[in-house]
Structure formats: C-alpha cells, structure tokens
Image (cartoon, rainbow, N blue to C red):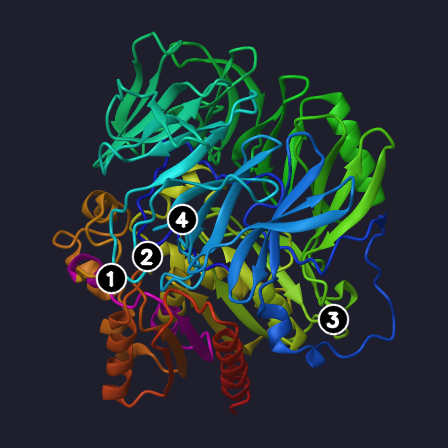
Amino acid sequence: MRWGGEGLFAPILLRSSVVVSVLLRFVAAALLFALTGSPKFVQAQAPSVGTNLPPASSIAAQDFFRLPDVFRPELSPDGNYLAFLARGGNRLGLAVIDLEKRTSRVVATLPEADIVEFNWVNSQRLVFVSGNVYDPLGSVSPWRTGGLFAVDRDGTAARRLALPLGDGGAIIVRPRYTRVAQTLNDGSDDVIVASNERSFDSSDVYRLNTRTARKTLLSFDNPGDVQSWTLDREGQPRAAISVKATTTRTFYRRDEKSPWLKWFEGDFREPASAAVAIGYDGAVIGLGLRDKPTAAAASGARLTSALIKLDERGLTQQVLASRDDADISHPVFDPVAKRLVGAVYTGERRTVIWLDETWAGIQKQIDVALPNAVNLFAPPEQNKRMLVFSYSDRNPGTVYLFDFRMRKLEFLIDSRPWITPAHMAESRIVKFVARDDLPLSAMLTLPRGVPAKNLPLLVIAHGGPWVPGYSWSWDAEAQFFASRGYAVIQPNFRGTVGMGLRHLLASFKQWGLAMQDDITDTALWAVKQGIADPKRMCIYGASYGGYAAMQGLVKTPDLFQCGVNYVGVTDLQLFHSVTWSDSSDSDFNRYLLPVMVGDADRDKAQLRATSPAQNADKIKMPVFMAYGGEDRRVPIIHGERMRDALEKLGKPYEWMVKSDEGHGYTKLENRVEFYTRFEAFMKKALSRP
C-alpha cells in the first residue's frame, strides 16, 4: 500500500535534482516482520507452490491488511544478539534475543507511546525513538513528536536523551527533532545525531553520549539551511546540502578543521553532484549524472544518477556504477574489509551491483538457495553472521540467518506467517511507453487459476507523487483484489522517483495532465494486450493517487466504470488556501509547490481545470470516497468539497469517514471495513449493464 505520506506536500529535498531514491535501510527497514515465541532454526527452504489449492477468495480481508506484531529485526555489531520491535497490548516495545543462548526478553516499553525506531549503539547498548503508530497522520510520521532514549540490552541503565514534544494530538508543523544520524561502534557509548535545536530551518550535527545525555556540537560553522549531512567514519560532518526557497547549495570540507567549500549553487532542478558517503580510505563517494545533461537530453536519455567518485572540487573522477534505466540510490560498504563493495538501485527489482567478487559470490550462493526471490543483505560489522531478507511477489518476506563459517542459511522469521505464498497471485513488471514516448513501467498482478484474458481491471495510482514506485514484490492491495478475481495494474507514472531526472522533471506542473495521461496509457496498454475488459475497469488511489482516481473520472469519463478515492486531494487551489494542514507553513508550500504543482495566481486557470471538485459535472461514473476526520496531510475539506459537488449534481457516490483516523486508516477494523466496502462497491459498479 503506497499513499506516499512522506511525499505529498512534504518538504522535498531533491539533492540538486540528482534523482535519489528514498534511502531505505538495506536489511528489513520499514518492512514489518512477525515472530511467534522464540525463533526456531531450521535449514532454509524455498516456499512451495503446491497443488489443489483452496480458492483465493476464501482468504479473509484482514489477513492481507493486518500488521505484524513484531518487526524490524537488527543484529548487534558483534552478531550475537537480535533486537526487534514487538507488540505488547496496544503498544510496540523493544526486545532482544540472545542468539547463542536462544533466550529473549523485552528491554524497553513506554506506557503511553510506541517505540518506532531503534539502533544498536554498540553490542551492549541501544538507542530508540518514541512515537505513536496511531497518530492521526497515520503512516506519514509516527515519530514526529517522539523523544530519544537509550537502554542496555538487558533492560538496565535506561536514559532519556531528548524530550518528546508532548501530546501527539497537537498540530506541530515545524517540530524540533533529534535523530540518530550515524552509529560509531568505536568502543564508546556515543552516537551522532542530527537536530534542529539551534534553528527550526537548519540541521546541526552533535556527538551524543547515550549514558550521560551530554552532547558536543560538531557543526558549529554550519554553512546554513542544511537539510542533509554526509559524515565521515568518525562522525565528522564533511559534506552538506543546503536548501532555501528554490535554491540548492552543496558544500564539502576536507576535515573538521578545514573551511567549507561551496561546490554548487543553483535552482533545485539543475543537475549537480552530491557527496553521499566518505569511504574508509577517505574517498568522496557521490551521486551524479553519468552523462553531460545537454548531450544526454538531446539523445532522449533518462539522465539517471550514477555512483561516482568525486575530487575535492566536486568534479567526477570515476563512474563506479550506473544504470541506463534507473537511478543508483546509495553505496554499500564492507565494515570489516573497510571498502566500498556495491551500489543499490531499484529497477524491476531491488538489486545490488556488487563491485567485489567475494560479495558477488555470496549473493549468488544465497540466490541459488532461495530462488525466484529478491534476497537482500548488507555486509555486517563482523564476519560471523548476517541477516538476509528474502521476498517475492508471493512471499511478503522471510528473514534468514547466514552463517559465514558454515556457509549455512537458516530460517529465522516469517514476515507474515499467516500468508501462504502458494495461495498468492503472480506479479510481474511490465514496460511500455507513454504517448509522448517517455518510458513507463507498472506492476501487473493477475488472479491465479484463470486465463489472463478479458479480466476486470483495477488501476491503482500510488501516492506521493514524488516517491519510489512499484518494483517486483508482494503488495497487500494487489493481492487482495487479485484474490477476488481482478487483474491489478500499478503504474509508475512520470514523477516516480528512481527513474531518472528526465522522468522527474516531466512531472512538474503536470497534475491532471501528462501525469494523468500516463495512468490512462497504462490502462489502455492492459486493454491492448487483451488482459483487461475495457467495459470493466476501475481506478483507485490514496493521497495523490486519490486525486488521480477522481481526475481520471473527470478527464476520461468513459474509460473507467468507477473510481475510489482514499484520503485524496480534490481541489488544487486548496493547497494554497488551507492553513490547517501540516504543510501549510512549510517551505515546500511557499517555494516548491508553485514550481512543481502550480502557482496560485499565474496558474489559476490550470489549477481550476485540473481540480476534480471544480469539474464534478464531467464525472459520469459512481464514486466511493473514504477520509479521516483528523487528517492533517490532506484535510477532510478535500473530500467534503468533492462530496458536496457530486451531491449537488445528483451524481452517485458512497462516503466513508472515520473521525479518529488520519491520512490512511491505522486501525485494523477500519482498514478491513474500507476494503470490504471497496470490494462490494467495485463489484456492483462493474456488473452494471
């Protein structure tokens, strides 16, 4: 499920238009895992497909949409302990397993908050962030008002390091934060944190002792308006990206005693290189365009970001890894060998380009043991064991433990043990071109057991919209509707992050225009392939995707037989006039929104013409809309304006509101109700004569 909570309206740092995918933790970050009792270690086995399967429609809706009770396992630096977040009652706590003794214990809980993030400080101590997974902002940022705490792995020596910001019900548009930027594993109990303590609008770097809570400022000579830092192996800030209005600046310094050198200053849409890591040998590793923009643009290249080695002037010395069809997102280092060993990109699948034969060999060995899957791992801080996260279109994810000495892969944790891979539908990435020849892709999921011919089709537009898109994986929404007999297609329309600078810039001021055409072209592709029945197609999305669903009914009123809008934008002029959203006082709304979506004055006619709530008269097909009464990302006025416009015109619609929910329903009973009503609504709409 992607409604792009961190994408829509959020202050976007484009890193000087070097298209960088959102940095996800390489092993299991932001992915949920389930564990019942203590882990049982068995030899790794690939999920079986099986025969004589029960009908997919017999799988309950809640099995697709329930959240695991345990998630985000992470090994200690010495590889002897496994920490994870575990649900106890209605709150998430922090637990640790001793992998040698096979014993486990809960080491930290908070009476009125969840633990939503954690890091190992060293093999003895952990640092964690409090938050509320049932915050009205939903999945957007459960940590936004959280405090920072530390505890030993046995549950002792707990310490509060940074105060929470109080009641999560308060609207905090520009919150103070203290977040872990880097762990050191240097024998100390210190971590490096980023904080806006000195200025709401700029980040600083501190070295923080997790036992005394004392911190030392490391960015006293902050170049100003810094939104992102690059640290060296000792935690010293060595590069920075500064954003003010529509101007981006990048800085670099040789060491903590050297002055900052400005590498670049210009409009955020201009291509420029940015340092993203300092190697163990002191090399400056960056992301930047492999080709010269003018020549590449003339040839129609996507202008993808490559992993590059930079000199101290910010000039490219060497291209280390690149793809023609996808941006490199970040480098991979080996902490034991102390060298750069790989680069990550997400194309059809999330993949590592290994620059080291040893790690390439390990990847091959694991891929042979776990075939037909994406198998992700990061080189650990010891050569004893590491975690491997394996997933596919049918398997939500399984965590394995890889033993380096025995070269043995053992099952550890199933992501969602109640999901049987053999019962799931097959998905694949398809590629085609938009009407203006821009390369596009989409994830296609087909119901199992029926021919892929003339099927009812659900088009799902992702949120954001400037967020990473769909790659080959298990997707709850796609699987649920495929189990009900629908073909599901999820387009990566222009603006989807990770597909190159050309793809990104082609989305600016194209809400309801070329971006919408991409979604239309995706549906038409499925019809042309004979997969979709052109008389039985529905369009759906959440957040930006909800906007796209409504705009699809406006712009192509005869193409889709129904539309479903989940917490979606309906009036683009409300971007500028609503003052009670969580982004209303942000630099994004002031400076980037006019460039990326439209200016309130100069583009007034376009904003009106591409706002579904102001064009309800063009809608012919039934609509289902669902909103949260406490949504601060897309305030409910968007839904109310759309509803009132439809009602005034006598258009058919269904309406669902949960007063205590926000930008996406967090409570299982509400999610199940939404998807159950959605299914019934679509079935009725697509069965009309």
How far from the left and from the top, in percent, is residue 50?
86, 66
Q: Earlier in the sequence, mark 2 or mark 3?
A: 3
Q: Earlier in the sequence, mark 3 or mark 1?
A: 3
* Mark 3 → mark 4, Cα distance in angstroms: 32 Å
User: Where does label 4 land, which residue?
Assistant: 466
Q: Amino acid at mark 4?
A: Trp
User: Where does label 3 land, which residue?
Assistant: 448
Residue visible at 33% across and 59% down in the picture: 168
Q: Amino acid at mark 1?
A: Leu
Q: Is residue 388 above or below residue 252?
A: below
Q: Magenta segment, which residues?
A: 551-577
Disc number for residue 572:
1
* Mark 2 → mark 1, Cα distance in angstroms: 9 Å
Labels 2 and 1 touching (C-beta < 8 A): yes
Q: Residues within 10 Å of mark 2 (few under 14, many from 20)?
A: many
User: Where does label 2 land, which residue?
Assistant: 511
Q: Secondary structure at mark 1?
A: loop
Q: Amino acid at mark 3?
A: Arg
Nearer-the-camera pick, 391 or 88: 88
Labels 2 and 4 touching (C-beta < 8 A): no
Q: Amino acid at mark 2?
A: Trp
Q: Residues within 10 Å of mark 1 (few under 14, many from 20)?
A: many
